[in-house]
């Protein structure tokens, strides 16, 4: 396979995942602005930060205002990180790697693009927003479904998966990073736990509210949330889960190519952190520091994958 | 005359070069009046990728830079036996039609200055006389001077500058000869200057096609036709076709080049 | 539908009864409901859009991806009609390759006085770098698109020989797939010769031209300028169908004397490169130094025998419109036979007498740029306004050597489906030809292009043309 193709697959699935994550975050923000209008502005700020769009937003729009933020995150041409821009980039990469995709996967991406292009041609009215967000998540799921159902399990598939999990872990980590202070053990003593709207945001932004409740019998506890998102291997958006998968997919590539690369050692080191650390150790080390280290190491991993598999020269 | 040549071209870069190629036309060939007894090219900091013969029957080597290199050196050395044929090279061989040598190239496009040069060029005598006179005429219009601003001047720009080196003389001559209806071409090669061992640079001259004689050489800068001190290496429509080294590289490294050249009589 | 008496209609001739090849189709059609067919037409368009069978229009930033309109009434050609056309194309393509070899070697045709040297000397498509180069199998143009027009029952003319990079074959294939998908019942009633073997034949034909440097199964790649190119869809489609890699210039470099592509496992040499990048941009080391689409040094590797480039560089000399006017001589010179397919009589405006004639008759003639393509820069006299004609006259007088002129041909029509039912529209045909050392393979039919505007003679997709599926019936 061409190095460029591997890179195109990696990025195509990163962009798709990112668009889907942004949709989740808008969903979380919307929920807060409907239920807690006083907290809305600061929540929108943290959502803008998590998606890396804060500076761009403030440069053109100033203070966060719900409808403007939503429009910015959904479709603003000035926002290279908007959902529409993400889907366009995903499709552009899909065109580049078209020969590596099954017709089903290509058509799912292309249709996702065509539907959203039409849907997001105009600003979205409040009452239509939930439906639009649902369509975005659904279209993204169609692509994933086509991938699972029609693609041969070879290097093509592995690069697609690595892109997905790499981006997903990155998103989860950024959400935690924005909110780490409300997940610290000390918070429980000060705040009123069952009522912390910000915990709700975190769970909503990662679409894990229901999974959390099922596994924790409704007991909302910041420590448990932190453990859940970082270490719980059952949760498909946790860092531990994503890195387990990245390790697996890199391992499959090693088998197929008969070559072990530096990036695998980097990924193994990250996986080991999630296996060996219990939550106390992470809190002792510092949650913020732990996440910062993770973001730094994951960036290094991304660069190394690019080099090892010759995405570019 | 038996000449030995040692020609080193050394390039240094202020940053590692990620990728680069050089096309080199530095292998003289045996032909009537010129026998190449031995010749070799060594490349330090790179490797020869392919070798082939181009449309002018020049031997071409494509050299690639070793990745991340900051220096590359191309060394040519060999022995050539040359006979004085009074500049007469002979008939056109190979498949290139003579009309191709009437084509102007971007370096040899006649403009007003070249047209002016032709207008007062001596026009009496046979073809050969006219070409010799043209050669002298070019040199008087464009005296030899190494004080040149650029290395890749068009013939018209050389006329404007009013002086030039061997390459510039050859371009002006070729342009004018073509405008007068003669097929003409550029020649790059070596010249043993009698008074020294270390030569400044490789040499360039021109050839024009004269009915009955075939190709005849004119070293405009020295006002003579090539003799037994000239090793003919490559020919083409202009410098770019026959350049000893032309390259392309990625990255932003600045290039510095130095040449050492020795031509000696054995 | 009543046929226009002025033009030969391929469905109805000059009358009202279906011609033989169309009888079965017309019987089927008369029972069909136009509304249903029109909705099928929309279905086809949605399908094309989903698959992404789109092209980009140059200089039109808003319409980066447009569909070529597809008309679902097929153009039908009888086996016997086709056999004659195919024979003529084969003869012509043989002559083209022999001509190209000759032009880059001894130029016997010039020495013999059958072609003036200026035709080559003044031609930008002539590549001196190709002089003396003999590609594997002596094949220069591997993939040819010979544009034909029809004017009557037995009258076919060659309009143009596309010997560099003919495009459109993916439309031929997708059009057939779409027809099979929408009207399966038609194909059980009417036996149509298959076109779907084309990608396999292309692969085989390219593989047969692998260079000596190739050991084992030839590695083939398709070189595209990238996703912004107007024909990107076709490049991806062909690579996919041939199981070849789709590469861009920056994926390739010279490694160990070969042109190699950067894969996830290191550099892998390519044996045959089906390039869809023009000569000028192919190699920044040897041609345009500003090109970012090409591969530095590929011409060196090519001349050293390390790779096959299809089509060979420099083949453009053979599809130049001024050379076209010599094609009957060229065919005769290299095959020893009279050309089976006719040329459209062509006036070379570089000739003063011809120029005078052309200037005097601009309103009746089609005038084309010698190196133009895509229907740009041409004048269709009978369809042009006085003002357009006068504007063109000025251009023509300024540089007559850039133009040729031809009589306006009475292009045949084939009906298209409109809201009002069937309506005749002018068509041309581009059959696709593959040349390998041991055979010439012509896909039955080809791409029918149709001028969708009533009365228009310009079929180019960039100028509002559409396409049709083309059926060659089984014997």
Image (cartoon, rainbow, N blue to C red):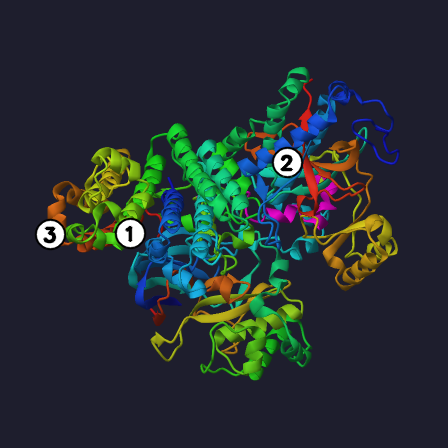
For the residue pair C188 and B157, the one nearer the viewer reads as: C188
What element does badge 3 sit on?
Answer: helix
Residue underneath mark 3: A284
Residue C319 included in the magenta stretch of the image: yes
Residue underneath mark 2: C94
Residue B67's quadrant in the figure?
bottom left
Using the image, name the chain to which the residue with label 3 belongs.
A
Contact check, label 2 and label 3, Cβ < 8 Å: no
Which mark sits nearer the N-terminus, 1 or 3? 1
- As displayed, is residue C121 above or below residue B129? above
In x, y percent, where is residue C398? 76, 64
- Span highlighted in magenta in the image: C307-332
| Both labels 1 and 2 in a single chain | no
What element does badge 2 sit on?
Answer: helix
In x, y percent, where is residue B49? 37, 51
Camera-near label (2 vs 3) is: 3
* Distance CA(mark 1)–CA(mark 3): 20 Å
In x, y percent, where is residue A16? 40, 43
User: Which residue lies most toward the top here?
Assistant: C189
Residue A20 falls left or right of residue C66: left
């Amino acid at each position: 396979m061409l190095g460029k193709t591997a890179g195109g697959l990696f990025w195509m699935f990163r962009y798709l995942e990112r668009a889907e994550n942004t949709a989740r975050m808008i969903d979380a923000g919307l929920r807060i602005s409907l239920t807690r209008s006083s907290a809305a502005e600061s929540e929108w700020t943290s959502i803008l930060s998590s998606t890396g769009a804060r500076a761009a937003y403030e440069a053109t729009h100033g203070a966060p205002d719900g409808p403007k933020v939503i429009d910015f995150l959904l479709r603003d041409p000035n926002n290279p990180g908007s959902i529409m821009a993400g889907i366009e980039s995903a499709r552009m990469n899909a065109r580049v790697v078209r020969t590596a995709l099954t017709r089903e996967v290509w058509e799912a991406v292309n249709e996702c693009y065509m539907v959203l292009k039409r849907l997001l041609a105009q600003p979205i009215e409040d009452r239509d927003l939930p439906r639009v967000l649902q369509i975005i998540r659904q279209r993204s799921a169609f692509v994933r479904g086509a991938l699972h159902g029609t693609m041969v399990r070879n290097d093509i598939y592995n690069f697609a998966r690595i892109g997905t999990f790499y981006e997903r872990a990155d998103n989860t980590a950024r959400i935690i990073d924005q909110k780490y202070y409300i997940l610290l053990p000390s918070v429980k003593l000060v705040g009123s736990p069952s009522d912390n709207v910000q915990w709700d945001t975190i769970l909503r932004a990662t679409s894990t509210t229901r999974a959390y409740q099922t596994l924790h019998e409704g007991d909302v506890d910041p420590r448990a949330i932190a453990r859940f998102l970082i270490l719980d291997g059952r949760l498909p958006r946790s860092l531990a889960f994503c890195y387990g998968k990245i390790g697996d997919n890199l391992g499959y590539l090693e088998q197929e190519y008969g070559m072990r690369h530096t990036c695998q050692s980097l990924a193994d080191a990250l996986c080991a952190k999630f296996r060996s650390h219990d939550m106390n150790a992470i809190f002792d080390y510092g949650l913020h520091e732990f996440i910062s280290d993770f973001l730094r190491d994951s960036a290094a991993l991304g660069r190394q994958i690019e080099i090892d598999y010759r995405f570019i020269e | 005359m038996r000449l030995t040549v040692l020609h080193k071209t050394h390039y240094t870069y202020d940053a590692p070069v990620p990728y680069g190629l050089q096309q080199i036309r530095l292998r003289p060939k045996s032909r009537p009046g010129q026998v190449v007894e031995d010749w070799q090219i060594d490349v330090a900091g790179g490797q020869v990728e392919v070798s082939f013969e181009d449309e002018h029957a020049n031997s071409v080597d494509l050299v690639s830079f070793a990745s991340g290199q900051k220096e590359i050196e191309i060394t040519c050395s060999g022995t050539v036996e040359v006979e004085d044929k009074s500049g007469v090279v002979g008939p056109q061989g190979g498949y290139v039609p003579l009309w191709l040598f009437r084509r102007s190239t971007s370096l040899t496009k006649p403009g007003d200055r070249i047209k002016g040069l032709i207008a007062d060029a001596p026009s009496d005598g046979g073809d050969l006389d006219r070409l010799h006179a043209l050669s002298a005429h070019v040199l008087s219009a464009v005296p030899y001077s190494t004080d040149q601003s650029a290395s890749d001047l068009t013939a018209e720009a050389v006329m404007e500058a009013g002086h030039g080196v061997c390459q510039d003389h050859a371009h002006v001559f070729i342009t004018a000869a073509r405008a007068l209806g003669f097929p003409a071409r550029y020649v790059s090669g070596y010249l043993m200057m009698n008074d020294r061992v270390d030569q400044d640079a490789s040499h360039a001259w021109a050839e024009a096609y004269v009915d009955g004689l075939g190709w005849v050489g004119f070293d405009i800068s020295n006002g003579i036709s090539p003799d037994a001190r000239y090793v003919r290496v490559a020919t083409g429509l202009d410098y770019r076709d026959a350049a000893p080294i032309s390259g392309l590289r990625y990255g932003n490294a600045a290039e510095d080049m130095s040449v050492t050249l020795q031509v000696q009589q054995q | 539908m009543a046929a226009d008496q002025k033009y030969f209609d391929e469905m109805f001739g000059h009358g009202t009864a279906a011609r033989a090849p169309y009888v079965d189709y017309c019987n089927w059609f008369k029972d069909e409901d136009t509304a249903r067919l029109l909705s099928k037409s929309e279905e086809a368009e949605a399908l094309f859009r989903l698959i992404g069978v789109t092209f980009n229009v140059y200089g039109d930033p808003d319409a980066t991806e447009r569909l070529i309109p597809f008309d679902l009434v097929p153009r039908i050609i009888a086996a016997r009609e086709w056999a004659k056309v195919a024979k003529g194309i084969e003869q012509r393509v043989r002559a083209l390759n022999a001509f190209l070899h000759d032009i880059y070697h001894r130029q016997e045709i010039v020495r013999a006085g059958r072609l003036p040297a200026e035709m080559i000397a003044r031609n930008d498509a002539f590549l001196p770098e190709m002089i003396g180069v003999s590609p594997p199998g002596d094949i220069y143009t591997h993939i040819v698109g010979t544009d034909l027009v029809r004017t009557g029952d037995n009258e076919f003319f060659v309009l143009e020989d596309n010997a560099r990079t003919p495009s459109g074959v993916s439309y031929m294939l997708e059009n057939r797939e779409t027809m099979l998908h929408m009207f399966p019942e038609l194909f059980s009633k009417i036996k149509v010769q298959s076109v779907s073997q084309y990608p396999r034949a292309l692969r085989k034909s390219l593989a047969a031209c692998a260079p000596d440097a190739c050991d084992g199964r030839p590695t083939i790649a398709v070189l595209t300028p990238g996703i912004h190119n107007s024909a990107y869809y076709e490049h991806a489609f062909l690579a996919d169908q041939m199981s070849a890699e789709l590469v861009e210039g920056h994926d390739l470099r010279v490694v160990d004397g070969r042109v190699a592509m950067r894969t996830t496992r290191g550099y892998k040499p390519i044996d045959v490169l089906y390039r869809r990048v023009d000569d000028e941009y192919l190699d920044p080391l040897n041609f345009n130094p500003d090109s970012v689409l090409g591969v530095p040094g590929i011409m060196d590797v090519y001349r050293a025998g390390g790779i096959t480039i299809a089509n060979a560089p420099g083949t453009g000399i053979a599809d130049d419109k001024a050379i076209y006017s010599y094609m009957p001589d060229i065919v005769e010179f290299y095959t020893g036979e009279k050309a089976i397919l006719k040329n459209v009589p062509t006036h070379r405006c570089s000739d003063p007498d011809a120029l005078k004639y052309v200037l005097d008759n601009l309103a009746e003639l089609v005038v084309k740029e010698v190196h133009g393509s895509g229907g740009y820069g041409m004048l269709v006299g009978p369809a042009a306004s006085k003002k357009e004609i006068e504007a063109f006259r000025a251009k023509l007088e300024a540089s007559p050597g850039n133009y040729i002129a031809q009589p306006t041909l009475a292009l045949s029509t084939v009906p298209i489906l409109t809201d009002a039912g069937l309506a005749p529209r002018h068509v041309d045909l581009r059959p696709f030809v593959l040349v390998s050392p041991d055979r010439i393979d012509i896909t039955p039919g080809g791409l029918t292009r149709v001028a969708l505007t009533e009365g228009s003679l310009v079929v180019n997709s960039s100028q509002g043309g559409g396409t049709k599926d083309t059926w060659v019936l089984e014997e």
